[in-house]
């Protein structure tokens, strides 16, 4: 179960495909717009409501750009997500009723843990970034800066409280619906949490408790990914280009940023492949090519 943008979903298609090949029946529970990502992977799909791109392009989503700091953005993200969290509950619960184990992304864990408790199911948290507080670095959600050993740990607990705030309205209603007592879910205190990133990029903190494990990346399932003919022709027409992409990030002025990207490439004497992405980057010329979605494994 996961929610968010493509980057919050695609890695779990690879994890699900590997579990499917190992003989398990796997269902990816996420926004309906990502159903195509599991095509041919052997992973089933259960759609949830909300279109994350439409939310980011809404007036409320554009409001995120008003904050330049990690803390400011987190405050606005929490406010936006809090109004959306409850709308995922029905589909998460429906999918869980036919499951033996729940694998929960960081974005769905607070609700998923309550559902697991209510249905007496085991669950494992599978976040894509380090969420547990540590003295070694600041929370990635705040930009990764360091406030010193004590400050980093305090900031980590602060982010956890902010995440709880997102679900503070939905969780009590869900607990009551499942006949559970009021209070927090059983959570993952002392249990295993599998983090889907590489320890070569972010080494496992020394002050994490046992059970917080770093597995390496879960690469997306891309099947027999092929490059579009136009992109293949561009690659063959000159020296290897630089790829520029923002993924699902949105920007306040796509035209200005696109011009800055092209200007930087040309000053460096490089060709460029620019991914349009959710930010709407766009450029043209003999030395640049704008593309839509292309599997990174093929690129």
Image (tube, rainbow, N blue to C red):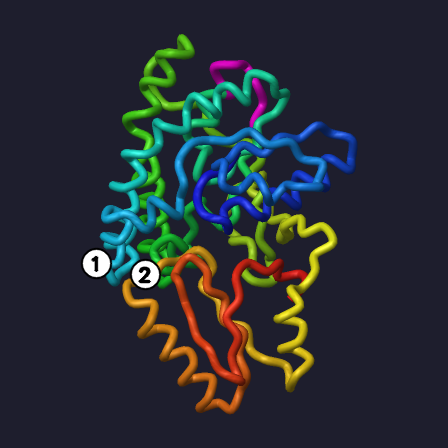
Q: Which residue in the structure is indicated by mark 1?
A: 66
- Asked which secondary structure carries label 1, the reply is helix
Q: Nearer the viewer, residue 143 or 233?
A: 233
Instruction: Judge whether residue 119 is colored magenta.
Output: yes
Left or right: residue 70 versus residue 195 is left
Image quarter of residue 176:
top left
- Residue 28 position, x and y percent, is 58, 34
- Asked which secondary structure carries label 2, the reply is loop
Between disc 1 and disc 2, the foreground one is 1
Residue 26's place in the image compared with 206, above or below, is above
Give the Cα distance between marks 1 and 2. Answer: 24 Å
Q: Nearer the viewer, residue 217 or 283?
A: 283
Instruction: Give the residues drawn in magenta, as a range.
Output: 116-123
Image quarter of residue 281:
bottom left
Q: Is residue 76 visible?
A: no
**In the image, what residue occupies the spot 54% across and 74% down?**
273
Residue 211's place in the image compared with 86, above or below, is below
Instruction: Judge whether residue 177 is colored magenta.
Output: no
**In the image, what residue occupies the spot 50% across and 38% down?**
105
Location of the C terminus by quadrant is bottom right
Q: Which residue in the structure is indicated by mark 2?
A: 147
- Residue 35 position, x and y percent, is 56, 39
**In the image, what residue occupies the spot 47% across and 84% down?**
265
Binning the other alpha carbons within 10 Å of mark 2 as few (below 14), some (14 to 19) or many (20 upward) gives some
Name the residue furthest top: 179
Q: Is residue 83 visible?
A: yes
**In the image, what residue occupies the spot 31% across and 74% down?**
256
- Residue 115 position, x and y percent, is 47, 20
């Amino acid at each position: 179960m996961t929610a968010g943008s493509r980057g919050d979903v695609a890695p779990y298609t690879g994890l699900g495909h590997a579990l499917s090949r190992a003989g398990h029946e796997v269902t990816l529970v996420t926004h309906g717009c990502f159903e195509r990502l599991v095509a041919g992977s052997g992973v089933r799909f259960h759609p949830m409501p909300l279109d994350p791109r439409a939310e980011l392009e809404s007036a409320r989503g554009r409001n995120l750009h008003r904050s330049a700091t990690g803390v400011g953005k987190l405050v606005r993200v929490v406010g936006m997500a809090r109004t959306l969290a409850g709308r995922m509950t029905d589909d998460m619960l429906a999918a869980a009723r036919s499951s033996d184990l729940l694998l929960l992304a960081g974005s769905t864990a607070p609700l998923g843990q309550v559902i697991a408790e209510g249905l007496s199911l085991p669950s494992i948290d599978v976040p894509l970034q380090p969420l547990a507080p540590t003295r070694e670095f600041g929370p990635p959600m705040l930009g990764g800066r360091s406030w010193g050993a004590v400050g980093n740990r305090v900031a980590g607990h602060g982010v956890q409280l902010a995440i709880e705030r997102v679900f503070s309205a939905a969780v009590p209603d869900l607990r009551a619906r499942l006949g559970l007592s009021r209070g927090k879910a059983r959570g993952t205190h002392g249990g295993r949490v599998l983090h889907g990133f590489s320890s070569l990029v972010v080494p496992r903190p020394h002050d994490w408790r046992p059970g917080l494990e770093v597995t390496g990346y879960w690469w997306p399932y891309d099947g027999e990914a092929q490059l579009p003919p136009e992109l293949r022709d561009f690659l063959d027409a000159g020296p290897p280009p630089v790829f520029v992409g923002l993924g699902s990030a949105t920007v306040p002025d796509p035209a200005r940023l696109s011009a800055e990207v092209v200007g930087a490439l040309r000053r460096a004497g490089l060709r460029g492949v620019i991914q349009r992405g959710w930010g709407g980057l766009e450029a043209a010329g003999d030395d640049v090519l704008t593309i839509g979605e292309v599997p990174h494994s093929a690129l």
